[in-house]
Image (cartoon, grey):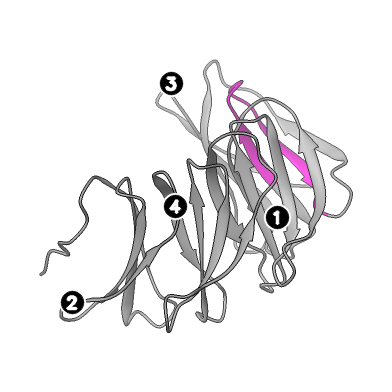
Amino acid sequence: LRTLRGHGHGVRSAVFSPDGQEVLTASDDGTAKVWNAASGACLRTLKGHREHVASAVLSPDGQEVLTASDDGTAKVWSAASGACLRTFEGHGDFVYSAVFSPDGQEVLTASVDRTAKVWNAASGECLCNFGYDPVLSAVFSPDGQEVLRVSEDGTANVNSAASGLFLRTFEGHGDRVVFAVFSPDGQEVLTAFQDGTAKVWSAV
Protein backbone atom coordinates (compact mmCIF):
# COMPACT_ATOMS: atom_id res chain seq x y z
CA LEU A 1 0.00 0.00 0.00
CA ARG A 2 2.76 2.47 0.88
CA THR A 3 6.41 2.78 1.93
CA LEU A 4 7.57 5.18 4.64
CA ARG A 5 10.92 6.65 3.58
CA GLY A 6 13.05 9.15 5.44
CA HIS A 7 15.31 7.36 7.92
CA GLY A 8 19.03 7.41 7.18
CA HIS A 9 19.71 3.89 8.49
CA GLY A 10 17.87 0.68 9.36
CA VAL A 11 14.47 0.80 11.09
CA ARG A 12 14.40 -1.27 14.30
CA SER A 13 10.70 -1.04 15.15
CA ALA A 14 7.41 0.22 13.74
CA VAL A 15 4.01 0.44 15.47
CA PHE A 16 0.60 1.98 14.82
CA SER A 17 -0.92 4.63 17.09
CA PRO A 18 -3.90 3.41 19.17
CA ASP A 19 -6.34 4.98 16.69
CA GLY A 20 -4.47 3.63 13.66
CA GLN A 21 -4.04 7.08 12.13
CA GLU A 22 -0.30 7.33 12.62
CA VAL A 23 2.79 5.11 12.51
CA LEU A 24 5.79 5.39 14.83
CA THR A 25 9.24 4.17 13.78
CA ALA A 26 12.61 3.86 15.57
CA SER A 27 15.88 3.84 13.66
CA ASP A 28 19.62 3.30 13.82
CA ASP A 29 19.95 6.87 12.53
CA GLY A 30 19.31 8.03 16.12
CA THR A 31 15.76 9.27 15.55
CA ALA A 32 12.16 8.19 15.86
CA LYS A 33 9.56 9.45 13.41
CA VAL A 34 5.80 9.89 13.43
CA TRP A 35 4.08 9.33 10.07
CA ASN A 36 0.62 9.75 8.64
CA ALA A 37 -0.51 6.14 8.17
CA ALA A 38 -2.74 6.94 5.19
CA SER A 39 -0.42 9.16 3.16
CA GLY A 40 3.01 8.03 4.38
CA ALA A 41 4.04 11.64 5.05
CA CYS A 42 6.50 12.24 7.91
CA LEU A 43 4.76 14.43 10.49
CA ARG A 44 7.45 14.75 13.17
CA THR A 45 11.03 13.66 13.80
CA LEU A 46 12.07 12.98 17.41
CA LYS A 47 15.75 13.85 17.61
CA GLY A 48 17.83 13.90 20.78
CA HIS A 49 19.37 10.48 21.38
CA ARG A 50 23.13 10.20 20.88
CA GLU A 51 23.05 6.65 19.49
CA HIS A 52 20.71 4.23 17.71
CA VAL A 53 17.07 4.21 18.80
CA ALA A 54 16.18 0.59 19.61
CA SER A 55 12.42 0.95 20.10
CA ALA A 56 9.60 3.47 20.18
CA VAL A 57 6.09 3.03 21.61
CA LEU A 58 3.11 5.24 22.32
CA SER A 59 1.54 5.81 25.73
CA PRO A 60 -1.85 4.17 26.32
CA ASP A 61 -3.61 7.49 25.62
CA GLY A 62 -1.51 8.15 22.50
CA GLN A 63 -0.29 11.50 23.82
CA GLU A 64 3.36 10.59 24.43
CA VAL A 65 6.12 8.60 22.74
CA LEU A 66 8.64 6.51 24.70
CA THR A 67 11.98 5.67 23.08
CA ALA A 68 14.85 3.38 24.16
CA SER A 69 18.37 3.94 22.89
CA ASP A 70 21.85 2.48 22.68
CA ASP A 71 22.99 5.69 24.44
CA GLY A 72 21.78 4.11 27.71
CA THR A 73 18.70 6.30 28.15
CA ALA A 74 14.99 6.28 27.50
CA LYS A 75 13.08 9.43 26.62
CA VAL A 76 9.46 10.58 26.66
CA TRP A 77 8.32 12.94 23.90
CA SER A 78 5.15 14.82 23.07
CA ALA A 79 3.48 12.91 20.27
CA ALA A 80 1.86 16.14 19.06
CA SER A 81 4.88 18.47 18.98
CA GLY A 82 7.87 16.12 19.03
CA ALA A 83 9.37 17.95 22.03
CA CYS A 84 11.41 15.89 24.50
CA LEU A 85 9.59 16.01 27.86
CA ARG A 86 11.91 13.95 30.08
CA THR A 87 14.91 11.61 30.02
CA PHE A 88 15.32 8.44 32.10
CA GLU A 89 18.98 8.13 33.05
CA GLY A 90 20.55 5.44 35.23
CA HIS A 91 21.43 2.50 33.01
CA GLY A 92 25.10 1.80 32.32
CA ASP A 93 24.72 0.31 28.84
CA PHE A 94 22.37 -0.05 25.87
CA VAL A 95 18.63 0.13 26.67
CA TYR A 96 17.01 -2.54 24.50
CA SER A 97 13.37 -1.76 25.22
CA ALA A 98 11.10 0.65 27.07
CA VAL A 99 7.34 0.32 27.60
CA PHE A 100 4.58 2.11 29.48
CA SER A 101 2.55 0.39 32.19
CA PRO A 102 -1.09 -0.27 31.20
CA ASP A 103 -2.22 2.88 33.04
CA GLY A 104 0.62 4.99 31.64
CA GLN A 105 1.87 5.93 35.11
CA GLU A 106 5.10 3.96 34.98
CA VAL A 107 7.85 3.10 32.50
CA LEU A 108 9.76 -0.19 32.33
CA THR A 109 13.22 -0.35 30.73
CA ALA A 110 15.43 -3.34 29.93
CA SER A 111 19.19 -3.00 29.50
CA VAL A 112 22.39 -4.83 28.62
CA ASP A 113 23.78 -3.54 31.96
CA ARG A 114 22.09 -6.57 33.64
CA THR A 115 19.12 -4.62 35.00
CA ALA A 116 15.49 -3.81 34.35
CA LYS A 117 14.09 -0.67 35.96
CA VAL A 118 10.62 0.67 36.77
CA TRP A 119 10.31 4.48 36.67
CA ASN A 120 7.68 7.07 37.51
CA ALA A 121 6.59 8.18 34.03
CA ALA A 122 5.86 11.77 35.10
CA SER A 123 8.89 12.53 37.26
CA GLY A 124 11.53 10.17 35.84
CA GLU A 125 12.27 8.81 39.33
CA CYS A 126 13.54 5.20 39.43
CA LEU A 127 11.09 3.23 41.60
CA CYS A 128 12.47 -0.30 41.37
CA ASN A 129 15.55 -2.03 40.02
CA PHE A 130 16.10 -5.73 39.29
CA GLY A 131 19.67 -6.88 38.70
CA TYR A 132 20.20 -10.13 36.78
CA ASP A 133 21.68 -11.17 33.45
CA PRO A 134 21.51 -8.66 30.59
CA VAL A 135 17.80 -8.09 29.94
CA LEU A 136 16.72 -8.27 26.30
CA SER A 137 13.11 -7.21 26.84
CA ALA A 138 10.62 -6.63 29.63
CA VAL A 139 6.85 -6.06 29.67
CA PHE A 140 4.20 -5.35 32.30
CA SER A 141 1.35 -7.75 33.02
CA PRO A 142 -2.06 -6.39 31.94
CA ASP A 143 -2.80 -5.26 35.53
CA GLY A 144 0.64 -3.63 35.87
CA GLN A 145 1.50 -5.65 38.98
CA GLU A 146 4.14 -7.93 37.49
CA VAL A 147 7.06 -7.71 35.06
CA LEU A 148 7.93 -10.46 32.58
CA ARG A 149 11.54 -10.26 31.41
CA VAL A 150 13.63 -12.18 28.88
CA SER A 151 17.28 -12.40 29.86
CA GLU A 152 20.40 -13.05 27.81
CA ASP A 153 20.84 -16.35 29.70
CA GLY A 154 17.86 -17.64 27.70
CA THR A 155 15.24 -17.62 30.46
CA ALA A 156 11.90 -15.87 31.00
CA ASN A 157 11.10 -14.76 34.54
CA VAL A 158 8.43 -12.84 36.43
CA ASN A 159 9.10 -10.23 39.12
CA SER A 160 6.90 -7.99 41.24
CA ALA A 161 6.70 -4.56 39.59
CA ALA A 162 6.47 -2.86 42.98
CA SER A 163 9.32 -4.57 44.85
CA GLY A 164 11.36 -6.37 42.19
CA LEU A 165 10.90 -9.62 44.11
CA PHE A 166 11.45 -12.72 41.95
CA LEU A 167 8.20 -14.66 41.62
CA ARG A 168 8.62 -17.45 39.05
CA THR A 169 10.52 -18.69 36.02
CA PHE A 170 9.45 -20.55 32.87
CA GLU A 171 11.59 -23.56 31.97
CA GLY A 172 11.02 -26.56 29.77
CA HIS A 173 12.65 -26.00 26.41
CA GLY A 174 16.11 -27.07 25.35
CA ASP A 175 17.04 -23.71 23.88
CA ARG A 176 17.00 -19.99 24.58
CA VAL A 177 13.90 -17.89 25.11
CA VAL A 178 13.88 -15.02 22.59
CA PHE A 179 10.43 -13.53 23.25
CA ALA A 180 7.82 -13.60 26.01
CA VAL A 181 4.47 -11.87 26.51
CA PHE A 182 1.41 -12.07 28.77
CA SER A 183 -2.01 -13.01 27.40
CA PRO A 184 -4.52 -10.12 27.37
CA ASP A 185 -6.15 -11.39 30.59
CA GLY A 186 -2.79 -11.97 32.30
CA GLN A 187 -3.55 -15.61 33.03
CA GLU A 188 -1.05 -17.11 30.59
CA VAL A 189 2.45 -16.43 29.27
CA LEU A 190 3.56 -17.14 25.71
CA THR A 191 7.24 -17.83 25.04
CA ALA A 192 9.17 -18.31 21.78
CA PHE A 193 12.41 -20.26 21.55
CA GLN A 194 15.36 -20.60 19.20
CA ASP A 195 14.70 -24.34 18.93
CA GLY A 196 11.72 -23.59 16.66
CA THR A 197 9.02 -23.97 19.31
CA ALA A 198 6.63 -21.75 21.26
CA LYS A 199 4.95 -22.62 24.52
CA VAL A 200 1.95 -21.38 26.52
CA TRP A 201 2.32 -21.43 30.33
CA SER A 202 0.07 -20.71 33.28
CA ALA A 203 1.10 -17.27 34.56
CA VAL A 204 -0.05 -17.96 38.14
Mark 2 lies on residue: 41
Q: Amino acid at mark 2?
A: Ala
Q: Is 95 a magenta residue? A: no
Q: Which residue is mark 4?
A: 55
Count neighbours of disc 2 (C-alpha within 10 A) and say few if under 14, some if 14 to 19, many if 20 or more. some
Residue 202 seen in the current view: no
Q: Nearer the viewer, mark 3 or mark 2?
A: 2
Residue at the spot of label 1: 187
* Distance between mark 1 and mark 2 Cα atoms: 40 Å
The local secondary structure at tag 1 comes to: loop
Which residues fall within the magenta stretch? Answer: 148-161
On screen, residue 17 above or below 136: below
Instruction: Give the alpha-carbon distance from disc 1 to disc 3, as whole Å.
Output: 25 Å
Residue drawn at point x = 36 percent, y = 51 percent: 30
CB atoms of marks 4 and 2 within 8 Å: no
* Numbered marks: total: 4
Give the secondary structure at mark 3: loop
Of callouts 3 and 2, the N-terminal one: 2
Query: At 48% across and 63% down in the image, what residue appears?
Result: 57
Q: How many C-alpha atoms fall within 10 Å of the one at disc 3: few (<14), some, or many (≥20)?
A: few
Q: Position of residue 196 (x, y in %)?
A: 40, 26
